[in-house]
Image: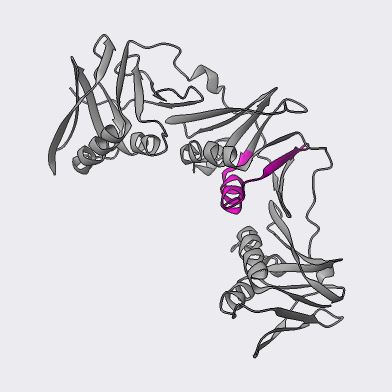
Amino acid sequence: MLLTCEHKHLSRAVALVGRAISTRTTMPILANVLLETRKDGVKLVATDLDHGIQTTIPATVTRGGAVTLPARLLGEIVANLPDAPVQIRAAENGREVELQCQRVTYALVGMPASDFPVVPEPSAATVVSLEAGTLRVMMRQTAFAVSTDETRVFLTGLYLVLDGAEIRLVATDGGRLALRTARLATPAAQNAGVIVPARTMNELVRALTGYDGVVDVVIAENQVMFAFGDTRMVSRLIPGPFPNYQQVIPQGYKQRIVVSTEALLGAVRRVAITARDSANVVRLVTRGTELTLSSHTPEYGRAEETLEVQSEGETVATAFNARYLMECLGVVETAEVAVELTGPLSPGAVRPVGQPEYVYVLAPVRVAA
């Protein structure tokens, strides 16, 4: 194998596919990146068998072939090379690999490409296409609510729902739930509801940085593939049913409070400084047009702040986990937010004013009177 490519292309590709490498693998070959020539380029692939990333960059190919190189070593080398053409030469046996850039030469030890596992791709046709920008927004407003509890693996992913001309992303950890919907320019070829690992979705959003085109989604029996530009990301789906999230979303309210998103976020952040208990409890109570937020931890003290709000309905005093509330307010894109309460011990809903596509539900915290 003998090829030459631009440093900027190689650097981006190595960093991208390297995200699929697992640090806990017991198979040495899975710590490597596969480089395989194409007619006018080179394909780079990495996988941990559950998650795989492949991308193709332009290259001048003098002699075709394939080789694998240690991902971490390759990444460190490429990151420190000058911005100049990079030549990669590999012996037929795939063991001796020479990498040269200007006056810098590395002699590396590779592993045969024949030992590298095949990264399967779903054989189904594209199910849906959507704008990368839309997907980024949907992820930003939901992914933080995913559970990290591996004993409930079905909550460690995002529920991707395709329903005609609508796409939904849902995330929950049992204590809060985030739902973001969007309209599709072209209805999905088929309706579906699958659980995609959070890691896959987070890596997808990271890979989409700076990309403003269309993302094609392909769903097969137990796999999903996201295709955009010259990049493909393939992942196994999480098996099992996702909770009935529609039942969790309150359909009405006893009190609705409309307040500046920025003001509420700032107040919660300040009051939370003395919320040092295990649940980071911040209490909320409205009297007339004033919303009072407070926290009290005997060992540290108390804090209180009052905001001007618009309120309708009966007064409901409740308490929420401050971090849960701040994480939601931090991704709201509207100037005002509505907090809808149904009771002191019933779930509350946060809805951006003027953006019905997003709703965030969080369970209250029981506190002593």
Question: As rendered, which of 136 and 247 lies closer to the eye?
Answer: 136
Image quadrant where one finds the N terminus: bottom right
Image: 37 above or below 243: below
Seen in the picture, residue 71 relative to 107 is either above or below; the reply is above
Q: Is residue 11 visible?
A: yes
Image position of 165 with respect to 206: above or below: above
Which residue occupies the foreground of this view, 178 or 296?
178
Magenta residues?
A: 196-221
Q: Is residue 107 left or right of 352 when viewed as pictured?
A: right
| Image quadrant where residue 14 sits | bottom right
- Residue 189 pos. (x, y %): 78, 28
Residue 23, image x, y percentages: 59, 64
Q: Position of residue 195 (x, y in %)?
A: 63, 36
Q: Is residue 298 visible?
A: no
Which residue is painted at 27% across and 32% down in the image? 264
Quadrant location of the C terminus in the rendered image: top left
Q: Is residue 150 magenta?
A: no
Residue 301 position in % (x across, y down): 12, 40
Q: Nearer the viewer, residue 184 or 329?
A: 184
